[in-house]
Amino acid sequence: MKTELICKYDSRKSFYHKAIVEHSVSGELKLYSYNSLVARLYRGKLKMVGPWDCSQTTRRHCKEFALQNDVYDQYLEAKLEAKLEAKNAK
């Protein structure tokens, strides 16, 4: 089943159908931002995938998804790792 990500913590009224959460029978949640898979959540483990750090809006979708699912600390770790990788790539 797919549902739109609702703005609960973000100051926006809506993400205007740009952020979709897919709920699987196994309990896994997948976040799609602009039709691209950007995050997976299964058994309390958040995995950032694909182009999750490519735009400010996609990062807002990921942050909202993490806050709503009580894995914001894991989101912050992924964000820090991405920054360190970018810095080391220079």
Image (cartoon, grey):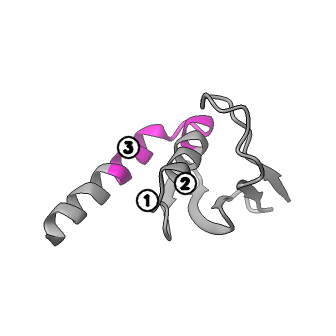
Q: Is residue 52 left or right of residue 28?
A: left
**Label 3, on which residue?**
76
Question: What residue is drawn where x is 49% and y is 61%?
Answer: 52
Q: Which of marks 3 and 2 is in front?
A: 2
Q: What's the distance in space between the residues labelled 3 and 1, CA to CA?
A: 12 Å
**To which quarter of the image does residue 30 belong?**
bottom right
Q: Is residue 85 left or right of residue 1?
A: left
**Label 1, on which residue?**
53
Q: Is mark 2 on a helix, strand or loop?
A: helix
Magenta region's main secondary structure? Answer: helix
Q: What's the distance in space between the residues labelled 1 and 2, CA to CA?
A: 7 Å
Residue 69 colored magenta?
A: yes
Q: Where is residue 71 in the image (x, y as percent from the top left)?
A: 50, 41
Q: What's the distance in space between the residues labelled 3 and 2, CA to CA?
A: 14 Å
- Which circle's residue, 3 or 2, is located before the other in the chain? 2
Residues at discs 1 and 2 in contact (Cβ within 8 Å): yes
Residue 85 or residue 22, whichever sits in front: 85
Q: Where is residue 84 in the image (x, y as percent from the top left)?
A: 21, 58
Neighbourhood count class around disc 3 (C-alpha, 10 Å): few under 14, some 14–19, many 20 upward: few
- Which circle's residue, 3 or 1, is located before the other in the chain? 1
